[in-house]
């Protein structure tokens, strides 16, 4: 039962606080644990207890599992006060955040996809902003990563302006036709708005950044979730 990822919410609802899985599955389990709320898992367990048939429990777990989707925006992907001094260091720091948030199985492939795009043309937009982007299934979910620098750096921008803020867009290649692409396009258009750019530069916390972008892009605000507290090794 513990070997099936879809059973994880039910096990956490039972109070399980440590899981031992094969090394190859650790990333998937960590990613799932990070998305789950202890309170919601407990509620799911109560509903499972109320089911009359095993098939009803199976349906409940299937619905729960299918509804789990990584949000485009996450506090873990907002990096404020970066001391990176070069474009290379910035991209490395942002790709590292994908690893920390369990959004990639291969950081090297993500970095390679970003640099391949940079080789085609500079993603420096002017006004102190850059939008590096890529399409690769090396990321496990479509994502927006934000990084704000303490000191502006050179980005080989067309206008020669140093960059103070970087907005990285990562799209799964196999899902390139989905509605998230519309969100990315909307974000790119908003970067032309001076008020929008200035607001991003003023916000003080990761939570404020995700809430502001959610409202500007018409996304459901990320709710504050209570950590499940389970460990995976």
Image (cartoon, rainbow, N blue to C red):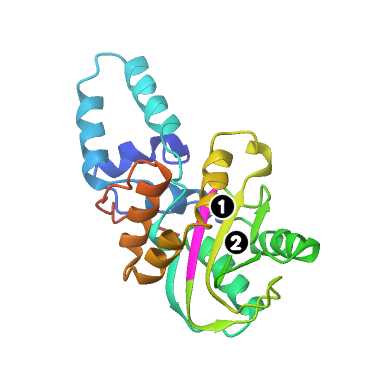
Q: Position of residue 109 (x, y in %)?
A: 71, 59
Label 2 neighbour load within 10 Å: few <14, some 14-19, many 20+: some
Q: Residue at x 37, y 15 (%)?
A: 55
Label 1 neighbour load within 10 Å: few <14, some 14-19, many 20+: some
For the residues labelled 2 and 1, the Cα–Cα distance comes to: 8 Å
Closer to the N terminus: mark 2 or mark 1? Answer: 2
Which numbered circle lies on residue 131? 2
Q: Position of residue 75 (x, y in %)?
A: 38, 60
- For label 2, the SS is loop
Q: Which residue is mark 1?
A: 188
**Which of 50 and 135 lies nearest the eye of the viewer?**
135
**Which of 129 and 6 lies nearest the eye of the viewer?**
129
Quarter location, residue 93: bottom right
**Which of 110 and 1 lies nearest the eye of the viewer?**
110
Q: Which residues are magenta?
A: 141-147
Q: Position of residue 132 (x, y in %)?
A: 63, 62
Foreground: disc 2 or disc 1? 1
- The secondary structure that dominates the magenta segment is strand
Q: Residue at x 43, y 35 (%)?
A: 6
């Amino acid at each position: 039962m513990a070997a099936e990822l879809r059973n994880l919410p039910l096990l956490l609802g039972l109070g399980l606080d440590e899981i031992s899985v094969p090394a190859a599955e650790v990333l998937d389990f960590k990613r799932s644990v990070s998305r789950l709320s202890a309170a919601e898992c407990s509620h799911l367990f109560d509903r499972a207890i109320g089911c009359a048939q095993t098939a009803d429990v199976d349906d409940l777990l299937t619905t729960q599992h299918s509804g789990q989707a990584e949000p485009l925006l996450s506090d873990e992907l907002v990096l404020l006060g970066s001391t990176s001094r070069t474009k290379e260091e910035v991209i490395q720091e942002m790709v590292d955040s994908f690893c920390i948030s369990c959004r990639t199985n291969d950081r090297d492939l993500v970095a390679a996809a970003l640099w391949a795009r940079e080789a085609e043309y500079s993603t420096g937009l002017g006004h102190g902003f850059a939008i590096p982007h890529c399409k690769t299934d090396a990321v496990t979910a479509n994502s927006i990563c934000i990084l704000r620098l303490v000191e502006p750096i050179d980005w080989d921008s067309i206008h020669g302006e140093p960059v103070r803020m970087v907005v990285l867009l990562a799209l799964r290649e196999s899902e390139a036709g989905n509605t998230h692409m519309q969100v990315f396009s909307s974000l790119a258009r908003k970067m032309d708005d001076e008020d929008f750019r200035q607001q991003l530069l003023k916000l003080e916390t990761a939570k404020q950044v995700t809430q502001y972008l959610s409202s500007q892009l018409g996304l459901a605000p990320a709710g504050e979730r209570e950590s499940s507290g389970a460990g995976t090794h």
